[in-house]
Amino acid sequence: MNVKTVINQAFHYLINEIKANAIGISATIFAISVFLILIFFLKPNFPNFMETHFKTDEQRGDYVIEQLTR
């Protein structure tokens, strides 16, 4: 089996399961709604932390490494 066939079968399986289950349809619509709200309404209202606090990519990288190795 190639990768496209597996992905296609998995996609169709998920779609059929969601259609067969009323709760699945509601949950899918809810999840998509929350995702769209996060992207279109919340994201523009919060500044990019890394861009506002650091001027160069090197400074940003150093900060990330420092936070990960604490």
Image (cartoon, rainbow, N blue to C red):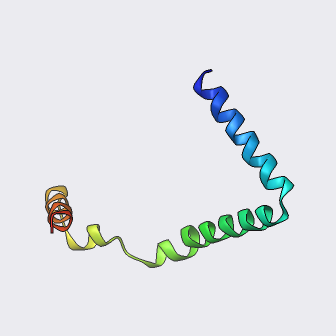
Residue ID at (27%, 68%): 50
Among the 4 quarters of the image, the one containing residue 49: bottom left
Point out the residue furthest to the bottom here.
45
Q: Is residue 58 left or right of residue 10?
A: left
Q: Nearer the viewer, residue 19 or 41?
A: 19
So how many labels did they put on this image? 0
Q: Is residue 43 left or right of residue 50?
A: right
Q: In which quadrant is the C terminus drawn?
A: bottom left
Residue ID at (70%, 70%): 30
Point out the residue furthest to the top here.
1
Q: Is residue 51 above or below residue 8?
A: below
Residue ID at (15%, 63%): 69
In the rendered image, residue 9, in percent from the top left (x then y), is placed at 71, 34
In the rendered image, residue 55, in percent from the top left (x then y), is placed at 18, 65
Among the 4 quarters of the image, the one containing residue 6: top right
Residue ID at (26%, 73%): 52
Q: In which quadrant is the N terminus drawn?
A: top right
Q: Is residue 27 above or below residue 5?
A: below
Among the 4 quarters of the image, the one containing residue 23: bottom right
